[in-house]
Amino acid sequence: MPYLDKIAKSVLFFALFAVSALGFAQTAGVGSWPTQKPIRLIAVFPPGGSVDQVARVLAPALQIELKQNVIVENVGGASGVIGTAAMTRSDPDGYTFAVVFDTHGVNPSLKDKLPYDTIKDISPVILVGTSPMVLVASKKSGITSFKQLVDMSKTGKQFSYGSIGIGSLGHLAMARLAKQAGFDWNHIPYRGGGPLMQDALGGQVELAVGSEFLVKPHIDSGGVVPLVITTAKRSPSLPKVPTISESGFPGFSAPAWWAVLAPGKTPQSIVDAMNKALNKVLKTPSVAEKFKSQGIEIVGGTPETAREFIGKQVGIWGKFVIENNIKETGQ
């Protein structure tokens, strides 16, 4: 019957429309990313430190690449755990990411319990880069060379050194050096690179260890004296500063690193899209030059590259933390 045929065609039309609309709704969140709202880039340490600086170098270039506002938000505390937890609790919709530091690879062994699962709740997006850690001396300390520091330490003199926190790579690198050499050094943990460098510049702490990205501006200004770096090779931007390895401790290497992470259930298509955008940003001349001038060697690559690197760091430094019974309350 013509009437029934007309009804059947109408039903079929609306059914097809509904299926089409449903399909659009299911893909709109990914397909339209990132047009829905600004992207939040959580820096997991306070303002003034290297994590904050890396985030603020990436944000404007990423904003241009993605054609969407990118807002840096500092959520510091607990060696990056509080900011990372804030990221993992966010909707996995591609609008919240975190910039983390090397402490991310130590926290699973250092903390009794983390407020997130480091595998299920986190999706690595990209390994931004690596950098030497630099041990610097306050002007007021009177220390002008690593040899002088070593010679004085061998006589039993105790020095105090600051890092960005217990379990940070700077802390672990210096703890490893002190143990290897038999030095009696006192560790003073800070809540971030900004407060650490303020005290180093003011002479409240004799020694400070931080990424080259953090300390180089203060070296260039003459505020602190560079003594030694923690990587196997000298830094091109600090060619006169010797390595620990060439200064009597062969094989010593402890690079700092930064990575961008996403909540664990973020769609892989968005993780890949963000990875692609960040790789482009890292090749932008202004970004590349800024990182190079601060001693960061850009890595980039795939999310899997970041996952593998972070996994290795967890293994290396986690073992050191456990073997040396390093606790949050002290060494």
Image (cartoon, rainbow, N blue to C red):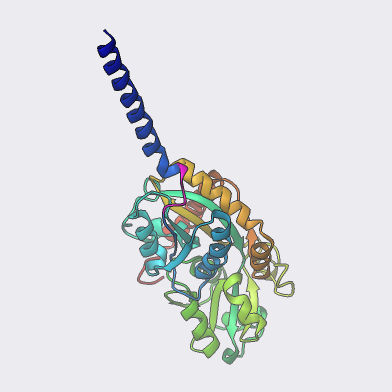
Residue 127 among magenta residues: no
**Residue in view at x 49 percent, y 62 percent:** 101
Between residues 125 and 140, which one lies in front from this camera angle? Answer: 125
Between residues 134 and 120, which one lies in front from this camera angle? Answer: 120
Q: Which residue extends farthest front? A: 2
Is 80 on the left-hand or right-hand side of 170?
A: left
Residue 141 is drawn in which quadrant? bottom right
Count of all numbered marks drawn on residues in the image:
0
User: The C terminus appears in which quarter of the rendering?
Assistant: bottom left
User: The N terminus appears in which quarter of the rendering?
Assistant: top left
Is 70 on the left-hand or right-hand side of 282?
A: left
Between residues 144 and 288, which one lies in front from this camera angle? Answer: 288
**Residue in view at x 50 percent, y 61 percent:** 102
Is 152 on the left-hand or right-hand side of 84?
A: right
Residue 32 among magenta residues: yes
Across and down, in percent, residue 33 comes to 46, 48
**Residue in view at x 53 percent, y 75 percent:** 183
| Residue 20 visible somewhere in the drawing | yes
| Residue 157 visible somewhere in the drawing | no
Across and down, in percent, residue 210 comes to 55, 72
The residue range painted magenta reads 31-36
Across and down, in percent, residue 143 comes to 62, 86
Across and down, in percent, residue 263 comes to 40, 51
Position above or below: 13 against 306: above
Instruction: Specify the principal SS of the magenta part.
Output: loop
Between residues 228 and 80, which one lies in front from this camera angle? Answer: 80
